[in-house]
Image: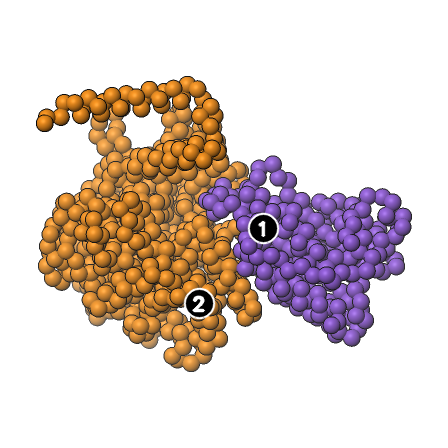
Amino acid sequence: MVTVITGTTNKPVSSERLKDYFKSNMDLNGTLYIGYPIIGTVEGAYPIDALWVSKERGIVVFNLVEGRSLDNYESEQDNSYNKLEARLKGHRELVKKRELQVEINIITFAPSVALIPQDDDYPVCNEDTLTNLIRDLAWNNPEYYSSLVSVLQSVSSIRKNRKKREVKGNESRGAKLQKLEDSIANLDNAQGRAVIETVEGVQRIRGLAGSGKTIVLALKAAYLHAQHPEWKIAITFNTRSLKGQFRQLINSFYIEQTSMEPDWDNLEIIHAWGSNINSPGIYYNFCMNNKVVYFDYSAAKSQYGRNMAFDGVCQRAISEAVEISSLYDVILIDEAQDFPVSFLQLCYKILSEPKRLVYAYDELQNLNLQSLPSPEKVFGNNDRGYPNVQFVFEQDGSSKQDIILEKCYRNSRQALVTAHALGFGIYREPDYYSDVGLVQMFEQKNLWTEIGYSIIEGELREGQRVVLARTENSSPKFLENHSSVEDLILFKTFKTKKEQDEWVANEISKNLSEDALRADDIIVINPDPITTKEAVSKIRGILYNKKIQSHVAGVDSSPDIFFDSDKDSVAFTGVYRAKGNEAAMVYVINAQDCFQKNNIMLPSSENAKIRNRLFVAITRSKAWVRVVGFGNQMKELEKEYEKVKEKNFTLDFIYPTKEQMEFLNIVNRDISTAEKENITNRRQSFSDILQDLEEGKIYFEDLGVEQVEKLQSLLNRRKLDESSKESIKPD
Amino acid sequence: MKVAKKVLNQINQLTTDLVKMALCDDQNFPVLNGSLQNRCCVEYSNIVVSGALKNRPYHEFYREIDSTRNFNLKLLDGALVQLHYAFENNSLVSHRLGYFPNPNTVDFQNDPEMYLEDDIYLDVVDQRIVVTPMRFDYDIRDDVMKNIEHPMSHLTIGQYENCRIPVVRPLTPSQFICFIIRNFYNTALKKTYIELQSSNFSFESTITSDEKKIIHIGIY
């Protein structure tokens, strides 16, 4: 059977017919690419219409003819041959002496042409004659097949372009890191496929932190732009500091593929919100184009509250717009889990048909605890009551519209399992009031396997014990083999903040002086986003006295750059700013804030929120992570980690029963947490008012006579209700 | 102690304090260039002296000195502080003390929580603010100094070409920094419990009797 990977193409009809041919000829093998590869040549980008690679026949390039006329297909065939040969010859593993060892065949596929010429040098065919043509092809060097496949699969050799490090010694951290970075350099098969696979509609890409969603999205934008330079493409995101990274990735990939610079007028890297013409955003553009009132953050916050600000303005903009004109042909959204559903809807509305929306999405990186509902719900129903968007699944359960990247390249197995164990509270001591240690759980059990865990004992069933572990398939070995477990992860509890601060400053100084790490290999993360500046100031003070440069990633005139490789300076950041960025050595400080003591008043969603911060912080680390803090709470957290280690980095727990699930925060549940937040907020402000009244800070008169009367009557009514209940209570 | 060394130490101490108070997000180390005996400067490690930007719009000027890290301190809202002192034979001959606030704070639309969650920003996110650069300059050269028109020590507000408000004497780093922090970062200052180091050390008065008769800035 031939695997078909459908990229984007300008020849939809003939592509479809070619695909159908391969789907119905089950005896053929290999992979068929539509709209891939694109070859960079001296004349610019040269896209190949379709390419079939198989062990039996080598490469067959199909030049597709959409209409009824063949024109000069002969010279097109020569052209395709020469361009592809030149490209493949660049790979030493495919060449022997001066000869390319790969058989390249060129066939023009012209399903709509009535009269097919018979020409052995320049073969032309339709569905009926293709079988005969293929039968005659043969490849004499099938031993090159696996090299050929990996050349074709590695869509790009581009990763982050940073300064090459100068490494002293073989065993230093710097040397280990260099090796690690080289190993990650190539895109794997699933990533390459996710880049190319194009859907004429909505597509979702899911994966863990470090599975390469951001790079896939960037390359996808560049790929689409290369194939369709006339399309208006937007790529948008939540974390400002990603902008520089996107631009760099797209630029280098585009040049690699096409030998040209991208046309930034048609490929916009754009914020979600935006504030003015110089700093535009999707929402801002929507407002301007549809002549609806634009809200800046302060205005939105006072209107809708802090948590609902963006949601509020997006909903309002959508409902106020009379006739929505389309602004883009493709929109790609990174970190979609951080946006309200209404923003996705807004994006959907401004897309031209067939509404190509790609959103990359990560369940567990979610800090706001708003999960995205299913695509059917997000994009609503059409006039006839059917969902606008519905994913189509193949027989094996996979879908081109729902791509899952399960390999995690950023974290070692140990770091990732630890992050999950702590994030879910797998080894947390059970609460005395609920008897549950777990803090949160996936709604769907199969999510565990989707994110790369294998069941090695028991089963995922209510009330049953289960042991989950990561395999080499989902967590490559080379990410953990470079150092001992004790060095990969270290938890440390100090008596005081001062001790912690001094230890961290000393370690950083050692990293720089002895370990051959660069300042931009290190980040220090404070999990509580609000206290960051103050929390990190003491460590920075110590570092300053040691003559080590440091900065707080934050308010910046060039906010789109997180790491500046020319800057010899250690980055300090709160957990929000850390998202989407990674470093070899990560210090998570004040981690005690991520352990909540037993508190019956604490809703599990709150506990989940602070533990998610820890998850995010730990998963920033490419190689080593230090989790430090002080006091008893930190000690408890360290104990949880010791259990993870004892269990040899597996998740060993009793799957919660339905009853226990009541106590947990459920990840990926389709309910609006906003409602809950609303109630909590009101309760808080009411108790504030009561306290102020009690302390005499405000008086009843201040609340308005009418309001007070209303309150009085409500309270009276309640009293009556209650006393009447009492009276009918049976004796 | 030689006066240059005193100034250097003071800048160092102030930088440490501001970092510890979480008022300073990025910084360069102060350095002493030249010899203490004859001519020397106290400046920051990657100083670029260039007049090329002199006539550029303020936001371009700001962006340039920011991206080249041409500053002693970068304060929490992105404002840049430059301190430059020159000495000859152990006495001060010039200083250039600049406060260059961030003209782009409106950019916080894209990441507003950073600012609004923390009330140390209260002063700087106020919408009514017009950011205003300020410079305290001091120069003893005879051909530069001109009674009233170009006082030896003067304050320039908002980069106005001929704005030179007389100042009684040259300013020490501590006098300058405290002025900036007290006036423009008051909320933040009150929130922290660390005190900025103050010092009794002060330069001699240089104001002329004519200059005293017009509005001037006193420091005694």
Measured as percent of width and height from the top left, residue A386 is found at 21, 30
- Residue occupied by mark 1: B189
Q: Residue at x 80, y 63 (%)?
A: B93
Q: Residue at x 70, y 55 (%)?
A: B176
Measured as percent of width and height from the top left, residue A508 is found at 46, 69
Chain ID for label 1? B
Q: Evaluate whether residue A365 shows in this view.
A: no
> Does A75 sit left or right of A2 as displayed?
right
Chain identifier of the purple chain:
B
Q: Quadrant of the N terminus of chain A?
A: bottom left
Q: Nearer the viewer, residue A77 or A633?
A: A633
Chain ID for label 2? A
Q: Is residue A117 above or below residue A82?
A: above
Name which residue type carries label 1.
Leu
Q: Evaluate whether residue B93 shows in this view.
A: yes
> Does A5 sit left or right of B137 as displayed?
left
Chain identifier of the orange chain:
A
